[in-house]
């Protein structure tokens, strides 16, 4: 008895499966969900920076205080600790709450003596935490005694940027305001010359005056003596008995 041939049946089954797959493929594609957009990644924050400055200050580095305002102004008045500026332009920050009628007061303490009335300056000022007024400085902060040689001053592997103090006042051209020890003396040289010459003039005038008074008294005494000695001679000249 011969075996049955099954090859045609297998071919028919394969063709039927292929047809079913072609028919079901569009239906499967139509059932897929719409693609969901991927949300944007948040910005990467620098883990070593703890400030919002233009120059990031790494953690562990000393950062100068931030300024409230930077403006260009002309000194219109000053007392022993505060200078009053007429604001010409604001470079950064805000003067709201501190400016009145175009004028703004900035506290300097004893350094106000280095500012001249009617001169123009670039002023970087911050809020004094104690007095709650705008404050600035003229001199650059002095370095620590010993600098990097002080034990433990730089015990860190972090490289700190060199930042200047923003709360400083500069000349209109951006240079430092002259704040040497002799600056007040140079500004007040007229007063110094007057203070030296006035005592010297008085000390010279007193002896000269006394000498002139002495000579005057001597001259008056001599004149009186000569006047007294001339009277007997005149009497003798007019006495008839003296003529005989």
Image (tube, rainbow, N blue to C red):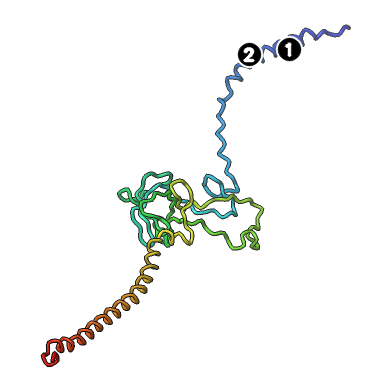
Q: How many marks?
A: 2
**Side (left or right) of 103 relative to 37:** left
Towards the viewer: 120 or 59: 120
Front residue (pair 193, 53): 193
Query: Quadrant location of the C terminus?
Result: bottom left
**Does the image show residue 22?**
yes
Looking at the image, which residue is at 43% across and 57% down? Answer: 114
Q: Position of residue 152 (x, y in %)?
A: 65, 61
Q: Which mark is residue 55?
A: none
Q: Which residue is mark 1?
A: 14
| Mark 1 or mark 2, earlier in chain | 1
Residue to which mark 2 is pinned: 23
For image coordinates 32% across by 48% down, the residue present is 102
Taking the view exactly as shown, the residue that stands out farthest to the front is 244
Q: Is residue 97 visible?
A: no
Residue 115 in picture, x, y percent from top left: 41, 55
CA distance for labels 1 and 2? 14 Å
Q: Quadrant of residue 229?
A: bottom left
- Few, some or many C-alpha atoms within 10 Å of disc 2 (few <14, some 14-19, many ≥20)? few
Residue 121's spot in the image, x, y percent?
41, 49
Q: Is residue 153 above or below residue 203?
A: above
């Amino acid at each position: 008895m011969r075996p049955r041939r099954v090859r045609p049946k297998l071919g028919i089954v394969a063709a039927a499966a292929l047809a079913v797959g072609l028919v079901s493929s569009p239906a499967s594609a139509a059932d897929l969900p719409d693609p969901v957009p991927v949300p944007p990644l948040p910005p990467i924050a620098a883990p070593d920076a703890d400030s919002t400055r233009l120059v990031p200050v790494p953690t562990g580095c000393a950062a100068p205080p931030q300024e409230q305002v930077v403006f260009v102004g002309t000194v219109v008045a000053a007392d022993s600790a505060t200078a009053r500026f007429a604001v010409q332009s604001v470079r950064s920050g805000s003067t709201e709450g501190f400016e009145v009628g175009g004028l703004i007061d900035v506290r300097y303490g004893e350094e106000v003596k280095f500012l001249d009335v009617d001169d123009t300056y670039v002023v970087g000022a911050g809020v004094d935490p104690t007095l709650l007024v705008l404050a600035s400085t003229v001199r650059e902060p002095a370095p620590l005694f010993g600098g990097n040689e002080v034990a433990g001053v730089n015990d860190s592997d972090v490289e700190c940027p060199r930042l200047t103090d923003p709360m400083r006042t500069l000349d209109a051209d951006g240079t430092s305001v002259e704040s040497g020890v002799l600056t007040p003396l140079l500004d007040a040289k007229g007063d110094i010359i007057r203070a030296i010459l006035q005592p010297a003039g008085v000390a010279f005038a007193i002896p000269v005056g006394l000498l002139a008074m002495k000579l005057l008294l001597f001259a008056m005494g001599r004149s009186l003596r000569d006047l007294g000695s001339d009277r007997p001679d005149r009497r003798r000249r007019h006495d008839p008995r003296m003529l005989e």
